[in-house]
Amino acid sequence: MSRPESGAFSRFCTMCGSTMNSVNEGRGRACGGCEKTVYPRIDPAVITLVANGNKCLLGRKASWPKGRYSLLAGFAEVGETLEDTVYREVKEESGVDIDRNSVKYHSSQPWPFPRSLMIGFSVNALSTKIELDENELEDVRWFDKEFIRARLRLGGNEEFNIPPKYALANRMISEWIAE
């Protein structure tokens, strides 16, 4: 599905045809004629820290920088709860079964491109068996908390690193290893 950049939405008012102008620090557009205000569509996506004791499930896309691993994530589908999205995405990307009763909200982070709102959750795994779907990710594996902690002390390397500090995934992983 194509997701146009935020600047591509509503250049002209759908009510009167006048030019739309940026408002609210670029978060919306207002009509110069009839004053109608519109905001871009936001696509909800979940990002999930799957834990099993002192191990955390991380995945890797082939297009990412060498050694980059992150939490499993994906977009919610129409009519799907966020909790159902957590279950579906973890299952699709890793084959791991999770305890649906352990899903806990962590925090969220807007990603302007591609207009998504990342909604972070943590969840407990019921098993550690991985069934990788290579159409989804290049690699998925369990990482020990001590391994991640030691690598992050070194600042990461081409063998193992996580998303940058501004990313929700980094914050969630960092808080998990600090527990």
Image (cartoon, rainbow, N blue to C red):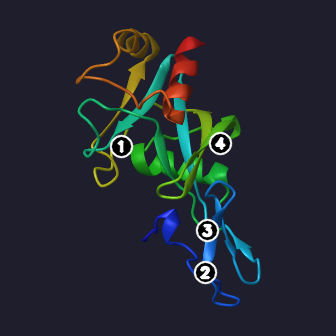
Say which residue appears at 70% left-offset and 39% top-offset.
Answer: 101
Q: CA distance from mark 1 to mark 4?
A: 19 Å
Q: CA distance from mark 3 to mark 1?
A: 26 Å
Residue 79 on image: x %, y %: 66, 67
Q: CA distance from mark 3 to mark 4?
A: 20 Å
The C terminus sits in image quarter: top right
- Residue designated by label 2: 19
The disc at residue 78 is: 3
Position of residue 81 in the picture relative to residue 155 (left or right): right
Q: Residues within 10 Å of mark 2 (few under 14, many from 20)?
A: some
**Type of residue at label 4?**
Arg
The disc at residue 131 is: 1
Say which residue appears at 63% left-offset and 89% top-offset.
Answer: 17
Question: Do we see residue 134 in this rendering?
Answer: yes
Q: Residues within 10 Å of mark 4 (few under 14, many from 20)?
A: some
Which label sits in the foreground, 3 or 4?
3
The N terminus sits in image quarter: bottom left
Helix, strand or loop at mark 2: loop
Q: CA distance from mark 2 to mark 3?
A: 31 Å
**Type of residue at label 2?**
Thr
- Precedes in sequence: disc 2 or disc 3: 2
Count of marks overlaid on the render:
4
